[in-house]
Amino acid sequence: MKNIKRGQALWRRAKKIIPGGSQLLSKRSELFLPEQWPSYFKKAKGVFVWDLDGNKYIDTCASIGASILSYADADVNRAVKRAIDQGNVSTLNAPEEVELAELLCRLHPWAGMVRYARGGGEAMTVAVRIARAYTGKDKIAFCGYHGWHDWYLAANLANDKNLDGHLLPGLMPKGTPRCLAGTAMPFNYNKIEQLEKIVAGNKDIGVIAMEPVRDHEPKDNFLENVRHIADRVGAVLIFDEVTIGWRLMVGGAHLRYGVNPDIAVFAKGMSNGFPMAAIVGRSEVMQAAQDSFISSSSWTDRIGAVAALATIKKMISKKVPRHLEKIGLIIRAGLKELARELGIKLAITGFPQLICLSFEYGPKSQAVHTLFIQEMLKRGFIASSNIDVSYSLKAEHAKKYLGAAEQVFGIIKQAVHDNKVNQLLAGPVAHSKFLRLT
């Protein structure tokens, strides 16, 4: 194992003074490699990351999907540095806000207005607030993962397993007002009958929020049917494109399927990791924001808009989604072939741009997953169950990744055969769900 003493030492310090250790659940060390994960970076450039001990890695996670162009992109950084030198904020507004809004409306001809935030979760909350203000109805039907705010966690007030099928199991609703119970009801992707049941039993559904796609393609006109239901019951349809947006095509996945929402929400990937989010919607719906109170000083900084403009323009000029798909297809096909040849029980789902891996060994699955991360780290890769392809991830990096995976699959095969998976782990098994870390 590489020397990662500084990273682990700092992580132990962090958990004493930062609840959970990290600001993002998905970056907690225990979800990757407990007691062995580098945890912190000193430098990040392109697809490479250097940890506090000077180890260099190829990062296939792209900051949990935030850096589609890869780290410290020269064009984005140049634009941001210029904005910093000219002044990030003032009592007056940044003109880039208007330029970005016009660009987003050109990319989404169905939309007419834009509001901004700085994170995906808060942007979804803004979208929900606007939708409720427009419809005058409180209840929400939703599909997928949409952040940490009260409107979403309210689903677990009635049944603490409601969110288990929506990416993160075990999310606790403590701190969420009990009076919100029954205001948010989940349905599963491609299960239109579940949404029909919700709207049939609740005449005051004002919002339908969902990811247009994530791991699977829509079936049997699913998106078209959701759109029809929203129109029929008078609900605002919100597409959460925080994760998938910009990866399948510039402007969002929903454009590929030809089904337009009333509001689309984008974040992180639209600005290559700089804090930025956009709520894009039909003018008559968005104007309802004027009937509520939605405001923040942080939403007026210049850097977010500047970074988003530079990122989106580069995605267009370099045809970035096409590159992501090309490299993702290489990796996905390579992993499938390796798993077949070596007899590894590996489920591979998701789009080429955002690959999801799942080892299927019953009770041993999480230990096998941990062994995979451990051995890939030894070979110089920041790896996990997701592969977020970035623009700087080239064919040569994909080849190296597959070469390392072949070696690791061989280790896993032998370990499973000998029933020694846990013995090969240098630390505990990675956590598989939300856990309170102390």
Image (tube, rainbow, N blue to C red):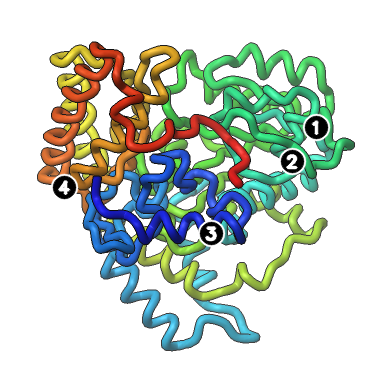
Question: Which residue position holds label 3?
Answer: 14
How far across and how far down the image is residue 97, in percent? 53, 70
Looking at the image, which is closer to me, 314 or 390? 390
Quick check: marks 1 and 2 in contact, CB under 8 Å? yes
The disc, 1 or 3, on the residue closer to the chain's N-terminal end is: 3
Q: Say which mark, if any, is on residue 238.
A: none
CA–CA distance in space, label 4 to label 2: 40 Å
Q: Nearer the viewer, mark 3 or mark 2?
A: 3
Q: Residue at x 28, y 58 (%)?
A: 49
Q: Amino acid at mark 3?
A: Ala
Looking at the image, which is closer to me, 382 or 282? 382
Dot 3 falls on a residue whose secondary structure is helix
The disc, 1 or 2, on the residue closer to the chain's N-terminal end is: 2
How far across and how far down the image is residue 332, in percent? 23, 28
Q: Is residue 299 visible?
A: yes
Dot 4 falls on a residue whose secondary structure is loop
Question: Which residue position holds label 2?
Answer: 151
